[in-house]
């Protein structure tokens, strides 16, 4: 017997997205290319909605 979910589950589509920030392990924050903290850029937050860190869990956000 095959579980019901296996008939309908599909892998999430991989989107190619480039973000204008990178994780800084020293600050433990996402920073913009010019060195400013990404979470302090209001225009960026309005556009992207968040600055999810790529370090560790995807459920944690830089505030």
Image (cartoon, rainbow, N blue to C red):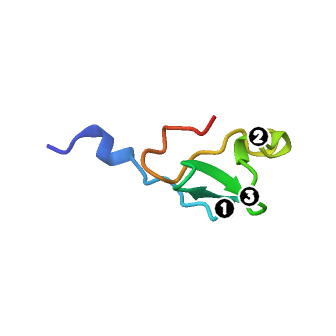
Residue matched to label 3 = 35
Asked if disc 2 and disc 1 are in contact, CB closer than 8 Å, the reply is no
N-term mark: 1 or 3: 1
Mark number displayed over residue 42 = none
- Measure the C-alpha gap from mark 2 to mark 1: 21 Å
Q: Which residue is drawn at 58% across and 57% down?
A: 24
Q: Which of 47 and 1 is in front in this view?
A: 47
- Measure the C-alpha gap from mark 1 to mark 3: 21 Å
Asked if disc 1 and disc 3 are in contact, CB closer than 8 Å, the reply is no
Residue matched to label 1 = 17
- Measure the C-alpha gap from mark 3 to mark 2: 11 Å
Q: Which residue is drawn at 76% across and 52% down?
A: 36
Q: Residue at x 52, y 53 (%)?
A: 54
N-term mark: 2 or 1: 1
Image position, residue 2 (x, y; %): 19, 45
Residue matched to label 2 = 40
**Regarding mark 3 in the picture, which secondary structure is present there?**
loop
Label 1, residues with CA under 10 Å away: few <14, some 14-19, many ≥20: few
**Regarding mark 1 in the picture, which secondary structure is present there?**
loop
């Amino acid at each position: 017997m095959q579980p019901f979910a296996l008939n309908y589950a599909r892998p999430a589509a991989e989107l190619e997205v480039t973000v204008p920030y990178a994780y800084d392990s020293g600050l433990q924050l996402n920073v913009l290319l010019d060195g400013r903290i990404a979470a302090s850029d209001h225009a960026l937050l309005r556009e992207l909605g968040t600055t999810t860190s790529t370090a560790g869990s995807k459920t944690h956000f830089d505030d």
